[in-house]
Amino acid sequence: MRFGAWLTTKSGYFGFSMHNLIGNKLDELGATAKNQRHYYLTAGKKLKLQKGWTIIPSFMMAMTKNTPIDIHLSALFDLDNKVSFGVGLRRTDAITAQIRVKLLNLISIGYSFDYVISKLQKNMYQSHEITMGFNGCSSYGGSSRTASCATFE
C-alpha cells in the first residue's frame, strides 16, 4: 500500500509519499524479513531567466529505516518548454545529466546519463536511459486544442 500527496502551482511543486505502508512479511527470506516503509519528499521551483529560459532547481529526499538519508539535488534549464537540459547529484551514488526535446504538442523524448561515483563504480560505471512521454495536459506552443489540467512539466 502507498500514500502520496502532490501540490503544484504555476511556479513550483511539493510532494510527499510513503511506500510499503503495511510492511508485508517476506517469509521466503526469513521469519523476521518484511518490506520496510519508505518516505519520499520532493520540491522544485521554476525561476524565470531571460529570453524564454527558466531554471528549475529541485530536490528529493528518500528515507528508509536503518539506511542513510538519500538526497538528490538537480537543476533543469528549460527553453520555452521545448528543449531542456539538466544536471544533478545523488548524494550517495551518482552525477546525472539529462536532455529532453518536446515534439508537436504532446510528445517528449529524453535521454539521461548517470555516472556512478560510489563504491558501486567497481562493478557499474554508468547507465543510460531513453524516455518517451505523452502529456494530454500540455500547453506547449499555446495551442487551444490541448486540455487544461494540473501538471508541472
Image: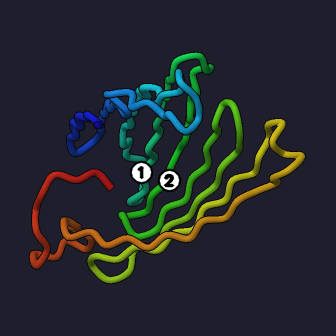
Relative placement, left or right, of 145 versus 64 is left
Q: Earlier in the sequence, mark 1 or mark 2?
A: 1
**Disc 1 residue type (three-letter):** Thr
For residue 136, say whether it is visible: yes
Quadrant of the drawing holding the N terminus? top left
Q: How is the image coloured?
A: rainbow
The amino acid type, in three-letter code, at marker 2 is Phe
C-alpha separation, residue under disc 1 versus residue under disc 2: 6 Å
Quadrant hosting residue 73 = top right
Furthest-bottom residue in view? 104
Question: How packed is label 2: few (under 14 Cα within 10 Å), some, or many (20 or more)?
Answer: some
**The C terminus lies in which quarter of the figure?**
bottom left
- State the image coordinates of residue 60 (x, y, percent, origin top left): 47, 33
Residue drawn at x 60%, y 65% is: 129
Circle 2 residue: 77
The residue tagged with tag 1: helix, strand or loop? strand
Given residues 45 and 151, the one toward you in this image is 151
Q: Residues within 10 Å of mark 1 (few under 14, many from 20)?
A: some
Report the residue that reaches farthest toward the top: 66
Determine the secondary structure under disc 2: strand
Tell me, yes or no, whether the two marked residues, 1 and 2, touch with CB atoms within 8 Å: yes
Q: Is residue 113 left or right of residue 150?
A: right
Q: Which mark is residue 131?
A: none
Can the viewer see residue 41 in this picture? no
Q: Which residue is mark 1?
A: 54
Q: Where residue 9 sits in the image (x, y, percent)?
A: 20, 40
Residue at (59, 35) in percent of width and height: 29
Nearer-the-camera pick, 28 or 115 = 28
In the figure, 57 relative to 70: above or below?
below
Please state if 21 lies on the left or on the right of 92 as rendered. left
Residue 100 location, x and y as percent?
Answer: 49, 67
Q: Quadrant of residue 23?
A: top left
